[in-house]
């Protein structure tokens, strides 16, 4: 469940932990499959699209829940942020695999998570602390 910005950050950290054993070795398994089958017959491509749609929906549902709970501001566009997270993962995994460097994956995932976090709503306790106390 991606129910908080912290859980999105934990997801990115788990992906980063997989860099040595997964992304440097063979890239993203799903992305690699897509690369191999993108020119296959339409039924196979439709199945690949369904896989990406499910992944996007999982991100979007979590981001929508964060928005509903007030963790993200009303300006947060869950579909846009979901696409950013997915693109960061796929691009980062692919570039890391091709270049043999951890930097692309770390930079893209970190940037995407920071972008999501930029829509965090101020927390009530943080607002309270920022108000000067009158004595």
Image (tube, grey):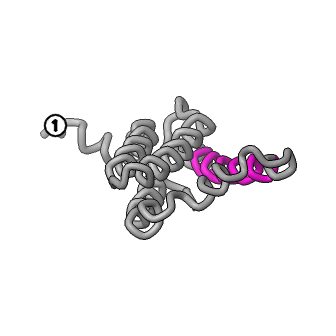
> Which of the pair 130/77 is nearer the observer?
77
Residue that numbered label 1 is attached to: 134
**Quadrant containing the C terminus in the rendered view:** top left
Q: Position of residue 118 (x, y in %)?
A: 40, 37
Q: Nearer the viewer, residue 117 or 91?
A: 91
In the depicted structure, whether residue 75 falls above or below residue 107: above
Of 86 and 3, the residue lying toward us: 86
The image quadrant of residue 123 is top left
Question: What residue is drawn where x is 85% and y is 45%?
Answer: 42
Query: What span is colored magenta in the figure?
Result: 46-64
Q: Residue at x 56, y 46 (%)?
A: 86
Residue sitting at x 59%, y 61%: 29
Q: Residue at x 77, y 50 (%)?
A: 50
Name of the residue lying farthest toward the left:
135
Q: Is residue 131 left or right of residue 28?
A: left
Q: Secondary structure at mark 1?
A: loop
- Residue 123 magenta-drawn? no
Residue 22 % position (x, y) = 47, 66
Neighbour tally class for label 1: few under 14, some 14-19, many 20 plus, Cα within 10 Å? few
Figure label count: 1
Residue 69 visible in the shown view: no
> Relative to 54, does residue 127 appear above or below in the rendering?
above
Residue 102 on image: x %, y %: 34, 55
Is residue 130 positioned above or below 46 on the image? above
Q: Residue furthest top?
A: 75
Q: Position of residue 94 (x, y in %)?
A: 49, 49
Q: Main secondary structure of the magenta part?
A: helix
Decide whether residue 59 is among the magenta residues.
Answer: yes
- From the viewer's perspective, tell me whether residue 11 is left or right of residue 123: right
Quarter of the image for the N terminus: give it. bottom right
Q: Is residue 105 visible?
A: yes
């Amino acid at each position: 469940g991606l129910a908080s910005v912290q859980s999105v950050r934990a997801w990115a950290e788990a992906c980063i932990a997989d860099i040595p054993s997964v992304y440097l070795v063979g890239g993203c398994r799903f992305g690699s499959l897509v690369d191999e089958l993108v020119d296959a017959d339409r039924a196979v491509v439709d199945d690949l699209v369904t896989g990406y749609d499910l992944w996007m929906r999982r991100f979007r549902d979590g981001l929508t829940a964060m928005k509903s709970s007030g963790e993200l501001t009303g300006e947060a566009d869950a579909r846009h942020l979901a696409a950013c997270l997915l693109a960061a993962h796929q691009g980062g995994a692919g570039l890391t695999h091709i270049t043999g460097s951890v930097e692309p994956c770390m930079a893209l995932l970190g940037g995407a998570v920071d972008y999501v976090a930029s829509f965090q709503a101020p927390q009530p306790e943080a607002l309270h602390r920022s108000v000067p106390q009158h004595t």
